[in-house]
Image: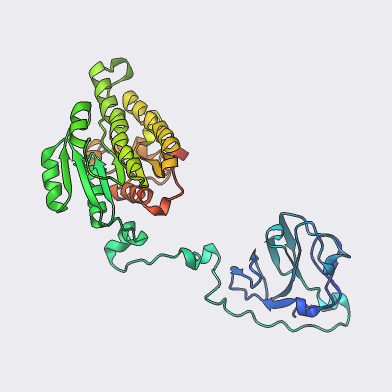
């Protein structure tokens, strides 16, 4: 049995019944097959329903929230905001105030007496032009092509289809781990890369992997040497401050040497290199992006890491301060806060299963990050895809900071 659409009152499921407009041309009816869970109706509103059988219902264009359409003046106005309407065979949940629509099931002909029934037409498969509900797939405008190659599926660089071919990037701490993979990813995406490391052998091997990159061997903990090495560096559009050291000591045993060394590399060098790059961008009137590699340790204390945690906490606040002051010059500044990352050093330091378990138990996803997980976020923040993102600290921690 199908519901009827007629001139009698509608069975809305809440409040007094509302009359159907006499002008039937203003009404649209269709049926929803049981197998559908979500669909965007032709009027543009998204409804969620759990149909138990095919059931026709009507949509009547409404006016602004709190105002009655001519067809509903004898009833009650729909409540502004989220409206939930219960039916015997259909439940529709609608943002009435957003879309200005009133949804109801036409009353059953048996309830209304001997009246004519408007035969509902089957609802066709949604046309391709209509975006599906996010649960059934992203809107067409947000779809990106996925390469069919295993490498493209594995690495989101290909998915995002980034291109840095007209830009020059500077990466510190480029000899190993996250910095090294960032250089390789930027080089593969067309950027001209300046790789900075204090270990010359690492730079030599990196140059062989990425022909054409420029290398600078300098200890960023030395202010004067850094100024000589990078003070006249060419125009730089993108900067990744990745260089860092970790010297583990109990708080009561922290030495001046360890404190000075950690502060100079992890924090002071970020000030110095960022100043060099930002001044060049401002002088050229060019936009830019800076990404600081922080840590989950900036927001969670770790035993024997008091100095390291302090420098990363300071880096997070420095990121926000830089974003505030450099934003007017169209320079964005963000930080990435990874958990333990499976670099060669990370694999060595966390190879003990018992030690690893203490950390993994605090990570909802139950695993450590891979280097490419961090590199993907760095590339996103460097790109125009994040053009409205600045002053942010982005965790890549499997939910550690949420636990």
Q: Is residue 277 visible?
A: yes
Q: Is residue 364 left or right of residue 54?
A: left
Q: Which colour scheme is used?
A: rainbow
Q: Is residue 217 left or right of residue 386?
A: left
Q: How many labels does the image show?
A: 0
Q: Which residue is drawn at 25% across and 43% down?
A: 171
Closer-to-camera residue (112/170): 170
Q: Which residue is drawn at 53% across and 74% down?
A: 129
Q: Is residue 100 left or right of residue 110?
A: left
Residue 296: give x, y in percent of width and height: 38, 36
Up-down relation of residue 2 to residue 102 (above or below): below
Residue 253: give x, y in percent of width and height: 28, 16
Splitting the image into 4 quarters, where does residue 310 fall? top left
Closer-to-camera residue (201/195): 195
Quadrant position of the N terminus in the picture:
bottom right
Splitting the image into 4 quarters, where does residue 272 fall? top left
Splitting the image into 4 quarters, where does residue 120 fall? bottom right
Q: Which residue is drawn at 26% across and 52% down?
A: 186
Residue 137: give x, y in percent of width and height: 49, 66
Up-down relation of residue 61 to residue 238 (above or below): below
Q: Is residue 299 visible?
A: no
Residue 257: give x, y in percent of width and height: 23, 19
């Amino acid at each position: 049995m199908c519901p009827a659409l007629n001139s009698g009152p509608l069975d809305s499921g809440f409040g007094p019944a509302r009359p159907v407009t006499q002008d039937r041309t203003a009404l649209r009816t269709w049926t929803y097959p049981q197998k559908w869970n979500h669909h965007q109706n032709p009027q543009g509103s998204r409804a969620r329903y759990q149909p138990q059988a095919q059931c026709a219902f009507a949509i009547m264009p409404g006016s602004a929230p709190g105002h009655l359409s001519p067809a509903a003046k004898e009833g009650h106005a729909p409540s502004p905001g989220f409206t939930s309407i219960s039916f015997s065979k259909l439940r529709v949940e609608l943002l009435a105030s957003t879309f200005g629509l009133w949804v109801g099931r036409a009353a059953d002909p048996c309830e209304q007496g001997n009246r004519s029934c408007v035969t509902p037409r089957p609802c066709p498969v949604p046309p391709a032009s209509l975006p599906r509900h996010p649960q059934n797939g992203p809107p067409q405008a947000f779809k990106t092509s996925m390469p069919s190659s295993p490498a493209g599926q594995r690495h989101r660089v290909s998915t995002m289809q980034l291109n840095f071919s007209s830009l020059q990037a500077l990466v510190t701490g480029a000899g190993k781990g996250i910095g090294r993979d960032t250089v390789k990813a930027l080089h593969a995406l067309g950027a001209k890369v300046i790789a900075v490391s204090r270990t010359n052998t690492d730079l030599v091997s990196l140059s062989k992997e990425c022909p054409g990159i420029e290398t600078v061997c300098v200890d960023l903990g030395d202010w004067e040497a850094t100024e000589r090495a990078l003070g006249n560096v060419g125009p730089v559009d993108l900067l990744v401050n990745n260089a860092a050291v970790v010297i583990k000591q109990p708080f009561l045993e922290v030495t001046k040497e360890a404190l000075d060394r950690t502060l100079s590399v992890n924090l002071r060098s970020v000030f110095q290199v960022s100043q060099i790059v930002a001044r060049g961008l401002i002088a050229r009137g060019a936009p830019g992006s800076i990404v600081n590699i922080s840590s989950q340790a900036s927001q969670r204390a770790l035993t024997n890491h008091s100095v390291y945690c302090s420098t990363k906490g300071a880096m997070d606040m420095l990121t926000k301060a830089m974003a505030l002051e450099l934003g007017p010059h169209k320079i964005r500044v963000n930080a990435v806060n990874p958990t333990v990352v499976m670099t060669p050093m990370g694999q060595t330091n966390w190879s003990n299963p018992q030690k690893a378990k203490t950390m993994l138990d605090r990570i909802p996803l139950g695993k450590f990050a891979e280097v490419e997980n961090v590199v993907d976020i760095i590339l996103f923040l460097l790109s125009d895809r994040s053009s409205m993102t600045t002053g942010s600290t982005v965790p890549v921690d499997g939910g550690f900071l949420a636990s």
